[in-house]
Amino acid sequence: MKSWDLGALDLKPRLPEILSSSDDARAVVLDLAAGEALNDHEVHERAWIVVLGGEVEVSSAGSGPVRGGAGLLVELAPSERHEVVALQAARLLLLLTPWPGPGHPGAMTITQKLYARRHAAKMAGAAQDAARGGQPAQQ
């Protein structure tokens, strides 16, 4: 058995602390200063956000915003885009399962990671070319 006093942890804002990680799940604690946000993003895993202290607003593309303080529990589907804004300084417990989820870089083989990097570089180059009106960069 492992245990943590989540209220007593000495955390720095926006620097998450991984409490536990296995093939089944990952538990992370995170402090956000008032006004700070985890801007629109997604995770590959199913995510549960538990507000341990403070007050936050969580919004997702699929539903309106939810506000709450200590005791609020929010569940997000895998890849559901969302944003978390601290209305007051807040401490959050994040539970992610399975860990890592399908498509997460930690679940990829070296070959898959190499392909993903090459594909991202190719897409970035195409976007730069499009921004220049379709003209390739001058050497």
Image (spheres, grey):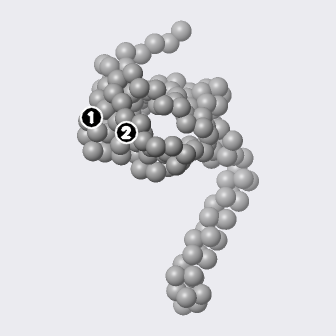
Q: Nearer the viewer, residue 3 or 54?
A: 54
> Disc 1 marks which residue?
89
Which residue sits at x=52%, y=49%? 61
The quarter holding residue 43 reads: top right
- Estimate the x, y position of residue 95 in percent, counting from the top left: 52, 28
Please tell me whether mark 2 sits on a helix, a strand or a loop.
strand
- Looking at the image, residue 69 sits to the left or right of residue 83; the answer is left
Counting other residues with Cα less than 10 Å from the Cα at mark 1, is it few (<14), some (14-19), or many (20 or more)? Answer: some
Q: CA distance from mark 1 to mark 2?
A: 12 Å
Q: Earlier in the sequence, mark 1 or mark 2?
A: 2
> Disc 2 marks which residue?
57
Q: Amino acid at mark 2?
A: Glu
Query: Do the residues under discs 1 and 2 have CB atoms within 8 angstroms?
Result: no
Q: Nearer the viewer, residue 22 or 61?
A: 61
- Looking at the image, residue 101 sits to the left or right of residue 63; the answer is right
Quadrant into which the C terminus falls: bottom right
Which residue sits at x=41%, y=26%? 72
Determine whether 67 is above or below 41 in the image: above
The quarter holding residue 57 reads: top left
Determine whether 112 is above or below 43 in the image: below
Counting other residues with Cα less than 10 Å from the Cα at mark 2, is it few (<14), some (14-19), or many (20 or more)? Answer: some
Q: Amino acid at mark 1?
A: Ala
- Estimate the x, y position of residue 104 in percent, counting from the top left: 63, 44
Residue 32 in sight in this render = yes
Which residue sits at x=51%, y=43%? 63
- Estimate the x, y position of residue 58 in percent, counting from the top left: 42, 39
The quarter holding residue 135 reads: bottom right
Please tell me whether mark 1 sits on a helix, a strand or a loop.
strand
- Estimate the x, y position of residue 89 in percent, counting from the top left: 27, 34
